[in-house]
Image (cartoon, helix red, strand yellow):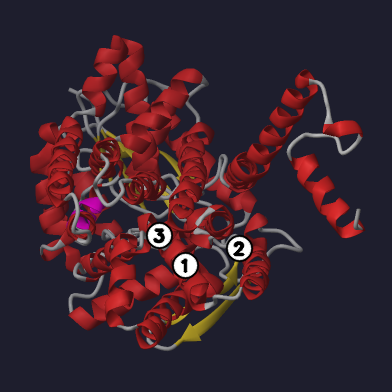
């Protein structure tokens, strides 16, 4: 027999689990075993390996961020918002201890402008382990890791296994994802819920699948429970859903009905919290989102708002991923134009209607426009869009490059560049530390390669420490600020009564009413009320009125204004008002930056 034919037959026989030897015979048992081995091997190689690799990416993401938190956050400065959110978590924790799950649920669902998902999850970790800031910091890291893992399945639905792995690696190494996983706020919870909602959307067969439509509604409802700002993304979700409903001619009625079901499920899910607090959330969003108070958090002029939104997002993504997203979106546009010129607009339009990247792109574009429409730029407001934007960018390159070998080379280059860009975020020490900036057209100055995350931007804004120091404020000084908060609480807790209000007459970045409340709840369940809203600034008469506004027997003041959140109080006028009200100094301590804190008291009646 011809050798080439023999080799072909041998390969065919091997695949069929047959022996090319005597009469192609093999025992039935051995053939079954062989077939099962081949099937299992095929399944492991093509079905299990990519999800396992994506899970490894997520676990590495979690492990590196936990290690970073241990080194650079534990027993160190907590920003004013983090302290407030941790205090909420501790209150939830004590509610369970005092009244069980019913009291905990009542506390979690109590009227508030703060979405409860992150703080409630932290309180559960406090119950399982113990109430410390470490287990609070773990929550956004876990949400971030889950977002990375869920992103893989969304990307796989869009363009297959290996495309998904590349996108997952880029998301796991994103400075945006890493930075806000190291911050105790709601950005990563919102990112997880939004990414899960988009996964359901691309899995819904353009809303023809009722099961995925229901899951979509549930995840969309969870978005607002994760962070109230995601309400701004709801019109974008609706546009993406409507696109899916009407982009196909078949099954439009069923798809529309599924969309209605999804909307009902979303409303019911969101109402599990909003039903108790909708008025507070509505007032907050209309005043701080689009009302008069929004102007305090960003520009009101439209084009200035657009530029600031882009600048903030670019700063969070840093240089490499900013260029990746911009060039990827451009590549997608060019690929669409090339397709239209080569096969015609009708065929291209048909391809766009059936492409799962279309609703994701609609959602991302509409959501960015929603953020641009508000003067309030917040912190990490665009974080929920990060996985979608990265996936869109990678898809753009894939659409523009049809040659498989070139795609592989491009994927390797992107993977390497992403790892290099994320290298500085491993540690604040040598050889990892970097802090370079670059100016881009329109956007302005953004980090090129930087190890810094939001807490460092907060400290830089405070004017404390050295901007040239890697962490702005050294670890030793940061620990001193942290211990000062604990010590200050210890000094005043026995000088007041539960029905009296502590008058906090200063507000610095590392030390304020929120940090005192946090230390209070880390020590005991009995919350001491603190009034941290004196006039900023004010006269002696203004401070007299503030002191009289609530019963108090302890007051705090601090000389100077170095490190204050602006505007500051007038220390001299405040102290004069304290003396007028019968307060006298019983103790004093010094801030690490040299400012004296005076502790005042008067008889508690």
| Tally of numbered discs | 3
Looking at the image, which residue is at 42% across and 33% down? 519
Image location of residue 6, percent across then percent down: 87, 51
- Tell me the CA gap for discs 3 and 1: 10 Å
Mark 3 residue element: helix
Comes first in the chain, label 2 or label 3: 3
Given contact means CB atoms under 8 Å apart, are the residues at marks 1 and 2 in contact?
no
- Tell me the CA gap for discs 2 and 3: 24 Å
State left or right for residue 120 relative to residue 478: left
- Tell me the CA gap for discs 1 and 2: 28 Å
10 Å crowding of disc 3: few (<14), some (14-19), many (20+): many
Q: Quadrant of residue 28?
A: top right
Mark 1 residue element: helix
Is 230 covered by the magenta stretch? yes
Q: Which residue is mark 2?
A: 451
Comes first in the chain, label 3 or label 1: 3
Residue numbers of the magenta segment: 229-235
Image location of residue 376, percent across then percent down: 24, 64
> Is residue 573 in view from this perspective?
yes
Looking at the image, which residue is at 38% across and 70% down? 312
Is residue 547 shown above or below 405?
A: above
Mark 2 residue element: loop
For the C terminus, the quadrant is: top left
10 Å crowding of disc 1: few (<14), some (14-19), many (20+): many
> Which of the two residues, 142 or 498, is positioned nearer the viewer here?
142
Image location of residue 196, percent across then percent down: 37, 44
> Which of the two residues, 599 or 405, is positioned nearer the viewer here?
405
State left or right for residue 110 relative to residue 601: left
Q: Which residue is mark 1?
A: 395
Q: Which residue is mark 3?
A: 388
């Amino acid at each position: 027999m011809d050798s080439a034919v023999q080799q072909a037959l041998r390969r065919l026989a091997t695949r069929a689990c047959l022996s090319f030897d005597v009469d192609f015979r093999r025992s039935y048992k051995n053939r079954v075993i062989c077939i099962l081995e081949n099937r299992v091997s095929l399944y492991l190689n093509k079905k299990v390996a990519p999800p396992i690799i994506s899970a490894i990416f997520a676990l590495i993401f979690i492990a590196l961020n936990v290690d970073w938190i241990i080194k650079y956050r534990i027993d160190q400065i907590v920003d004013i918002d983090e302290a407030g959110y941790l205090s909420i978590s501790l209150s939830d924790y004590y509610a369970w201890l005092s009244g069980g799950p019913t009291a905990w649920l009542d506390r979690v669902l109590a009227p508030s402008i703060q979405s409860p998902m992150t703080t409630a999850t932290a309180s559960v970790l406090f119950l399982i382990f113990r109430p410390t800031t470490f287990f609070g910091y773990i929550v956004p890291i876990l949400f971030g890791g889950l977002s990375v893992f869920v992103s893989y399945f969304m990307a796989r639905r869009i363009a297959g296994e290996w495309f998904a792995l590349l996108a997952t690696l880029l998301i796991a190494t994103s400075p945006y994802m890493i930075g806000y996983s190291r911050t105790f706020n709601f950005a990563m919870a919102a990112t997880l819920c939004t990414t899960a909602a988009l996964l359901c959307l691309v899995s819904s067969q353009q809303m023809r699948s009722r099961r995925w439509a229901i899951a979509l509604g549930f995840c969309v409802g969870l978005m607002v429970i994760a962070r109230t700002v995601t309400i701004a993304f709801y019109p974008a979700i609706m546009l993406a859903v409507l696109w899916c409903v009407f982009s196909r001619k078949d099954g439009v009625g069923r798809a529309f009905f599924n969309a209605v079901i999804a909307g009902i499920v979303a409303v019911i899910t969101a109402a599990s919290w909003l039903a108790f607090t909708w008025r507070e959330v509505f007032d907050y969003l209309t005043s701080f989102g689009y009302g008069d108070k929004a102007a305090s958090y960003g520009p009101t002029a439209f084009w200035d708002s657009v530029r600031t939104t882009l600048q903030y997002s670019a700063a969070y993504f840093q240089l490499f991923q900013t260029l990746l997203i911009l060039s990827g979106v451009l590549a997608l546009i060019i690929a669409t134009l090339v397709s239209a010129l080569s096969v015609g607009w009708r065929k291209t339009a048909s391809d766009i209607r059936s492409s799962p990247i279309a609703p994701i792109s609609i959602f991302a574009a509409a959501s960015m426009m929603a953020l641009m429409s508000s003067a309030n730029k917040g912190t990490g407001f665009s974080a929920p869009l990060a996985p979608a934007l990265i996936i869109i960018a990678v898809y753009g390159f894939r659409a523009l490059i049809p040659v498989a070998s070139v795609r592989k080379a491009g994927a390797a280059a992107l993977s390497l560049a992403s790892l290099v860009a994320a290298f500085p975020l491993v540690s604040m020490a040598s050889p990892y530390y970097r802090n370079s900036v670059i100016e881009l057209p329109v956007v302005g100055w953004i980090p090129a390669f930087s190890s810094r995350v939001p807490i460092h931007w907060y400290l830089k804004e405070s004017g404390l420490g050295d901007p040239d120091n890697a962490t702005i404020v050294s670890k030793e000084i940061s620990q001193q600020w942290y211990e000062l908060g604990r010590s200050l609480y210890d000094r005043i807790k026995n000088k007041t009564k539960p029905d009296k209000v502590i008058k906090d007459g200063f507000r610095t970045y590392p030390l304020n009413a929120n940090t005192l409340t946090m230390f209070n709840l880390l020590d005991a369940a009995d919350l001491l009320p603190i009034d941290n809203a004196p006039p900023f600034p004010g006269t002696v008469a203004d401070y007299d009125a503030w002191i009289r506004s609530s019963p108090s027997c302890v007051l705090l003041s601090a000389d100077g204004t170095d490190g204050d959140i602006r505007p500051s109080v007038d220390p001299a006028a405040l102290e004069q008002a304290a003396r007028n009200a019968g307060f006298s100094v019983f103790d004093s301590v010094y801030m690490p930056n040299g400012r004296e804190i005076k502790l005042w008291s008067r008889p508690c009646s």
